[in-house]
Amino acid sequence: MKLSTRTRYGIRAVLELAENYGKGPLQLKIIAQRQDISVKYLEQLMAVLRSAGFIKSIRGSKGGYMLAKAPMQIKLGDVFYCLEGPVIISECVENESYCTRTNDCVARQIWAEVQKAIMGVLQSITLQNLVDRAKHNKSLDYHI
Amino acid sequence: MKLSTRTRYGIRAVLELAENYGKGPLQLKIIAQRQDISVKYLEQLMAVLRSAGFIKSIRGSKGGYMLAKAPMQIKLGDVFYCLEGPVIISECVENESYCTRTNDCVARQIWAEVQKAIMGVLQSITLQNLVDRAKHNKSLDYHI
DNA sequence: ATAATATACTACTAATGCAGTAGGAAATCA
DNA sequence: TGATTTCCTACTGCATTAGTAGTATATTAT
């Protein structure tokens, strides 16, 4: 069970924007460069994030991207969901009419629990939390 | 993030065997029929489960498959891992030298937490737990 | 022995989704 | 007007997954 690079890239890009929050627009090529992501590919991911309302953009020279809300108001789980789609561990969890077998219902319970655990972790974290963690990590570096 | 049918099928097959534990070998075609899975495809999954030591087989007429251990001694997470491989939410969680960016380290922490949450759920459940749940569900049915 | 039954093993194939590429249109600033 | 940057759409190569096919091997029943 792998996470798509789509989601990993997207979240890393959003993290860049969170760190840049309040400092004006950040250009796509800068983000792509820092994160070592194909500019053209990231461009498509940004479109998804934009239409979902997490980020906004300014076109033209001196343009770029920025968060649409404060980092504290953006939950990681929401960004994740936007990029990765529902964590459909199994179709039957979302779609009631998918199966009829008793045995499956037990399996289904498990997938529902796993799904809940995943989203539980992700929804407890805001972008601000991650920015704070990154700062903390950096300050630790200086003491080593 | 979807689960492969491989894992879903495999776990459902193992659940059939768990319910049949102590009653002799259960034939592949019976399992496939009950669970609505391609016989030939399930055959391959059974080979994986067998070489991992979760099930054993008896060849020839009146043969079939059975659990190699008591249902109580088999953790769901282990079966899951056997079929699905490591829950590589991101490569960097497994492979230390995968990235160097500070930003990624924050992302990495998240993926590690998610991974831990998933395996935490799965490892807390044994096949026996699931058999018990299934029985309970059935008895509930009779009261409705 | 022989036929019937069931697993074991290996190779192939179609379909799908993912990651990345390409090129031009539209907006903004100097 | 030119440079810059986002916006939009379509295409492509690759890897993985799900499923199929056929044959070999082992065991039981007659």
Image (cartoon, coloured by chain):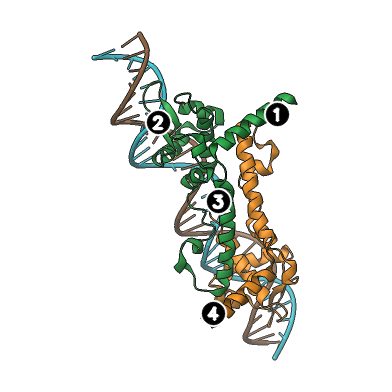
Chain colours: A orange, B green, C cyan, D brown
Both on one chain, marks 1 and 2?
Answer: yes
Callout 4 touching callout 1 (CB < 8 Å):
no
| Three-letter code for the amino acid on which mark 3 is drawn | Met
* Image depth: mark 1 or mark 2 in front: 1
Q: Position of residue B59 (x, y in %)?
A: 37, 27
Residue bearing mark 1: B140
Amino acid under disc 1 = Leu
Task: Compute the Cα span from label 3 to label 1.
Answer: 29 Å
What's the amino acid at mark 4?
Asp
- The residue drawn where x is 61% and y is 47% is A89
Residue A4, position as x, y percentages in the image: 56, 58
Residue identified by numbered label 3: B119
CA–CA distance in space, label 1 to label 2: 34 Å
Residue A138: percent from the left, percent from the top?
Answer: 58, 78
As measured in the structure, the alpha-carbon distance from the residue carrying label 3 to the one carrying label 4 is 31 Å
- Whether tag 3 and tag 4 are in contact, CB under 8 A, the answer is no
Please name the residue that numbered disc 2 is placed on.
Answer: B57
Q: Would you identify the image quadrant in which residue B135 lies?
A: top right
In the rendered image, residues at marks 3 and 4 fall on the same chain: no
Q: Is residue B7 above or below residue A25?
A: above
Up/down of B130 relative to A122, above or below: above
Left or right: residue A42 versus residue A51 is left
Task: Give the chain of mark 4.
Answer: A
Residue type at tag 2? Ser
Instruction: Give the number of the mark in front: 2 or 3.
Output: 3
Q: Are marks 4 and 1 on the same chain?
A: no
Write down the residue under mark 4: A141
The one nearer the camera, A122 or B31, is A122
